[in-house]
Image (cartoon, rainbow, N blue to C red):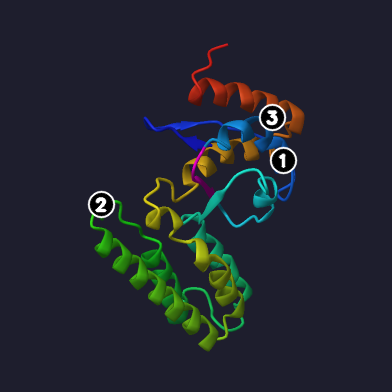
Amino acid sequence: MQYRKSGGLRVAGLGIGSYHGGWNRVFQPSLAAWKTFREFLLVLDGDASILDGLKDHVHVLVQRCLWHIPHQLKFALWRDRRHVARKSPEWSHIMSHIFDICAIRTDLDDEAVMQTWVATKRERLVALIAYCREHGCQAAATYLENAQADLFTAMTHRLAGRTQSRVERLMRTVNLRINVGQWGTEGALNVVKVRLAYYYNGIDA
């Protein structure tokens, strides 16, 4: 999905298949247009194979989806459950801090204030990673370390787009119909292409 300059979303490409892979097919129709961008911001949930589909084609600025960070961190903490139990004081400390770190302001017009604000967020993230390691949460610490370089890209470059949550909500119903309703992948893809083109791209067939 792409954010429209005038507001709202448009569908740039679509595919249904395995989680890792298939991005070349999704990106191919849009590559020519994307090459005209001076800076191209890509918001992703951590799937590195997405970048493989754009390699050597487009200059990409990567922004980790800030909606995914707390939710995926919960899974990392589940893997660390021998050290930190769910809803324990340590678990609550980690989750409350990551939600606060990922809370982004959009009204910081002063450049110096924005840079200081981001620097403070980064310092708090480093402290949170250290806290995780001190309490035996190695999976959580590693997850946060892998994400930290790309958490504030959009903010520091003054670009819109920090989460994929709207896309997640669009895809949830489709996923349920395939898994529970037993739609075929090809049929589901065709139906979704038509419906999303109607809703978001203004195509009325």
Report the residue marked by disc 2: 107
Residue 15 visible in the shown view:
no
Q: Are marks 3 and 2 in contact (CB under 8 Å)?
A: no
The residue located at (39%, 66%) in the rendering is 101
Q: Are marks 1 and 3 in contact (CB under 8 Å)?
A: no
Judge left or right: residue 155 versus residue 196.
left
Residue type indicated by callout 2: Asp
User: Mark 3: few, some, or many residues within 10 Å (few <14, many ≥20)?
Assistant: some
Report the residue marked by disc 3: 189
Q: Closer to the camera, 131 or 117?
A: 117
Residue 27 is one of the magenta-drawn residues: no
SS at mark 3 in the image: helix
Q: Closer to the camera, 169 or 176?
A: 169
Q: Closer to the camera, 112 or 12?
A: 112
Range of the magenta residues?
37-43
Farthest residue to the top: give it.
Answer: 205
**Which dot, 3 or 2, sits closer to the camera?**
2
Measuring from the top left, give residue 173's x and y in whole percent: 58, 37
Residue type indicated by callout 3: Leu
Point out the image quarter for the C terminus: top right
SS at mark 2 in the image: loop
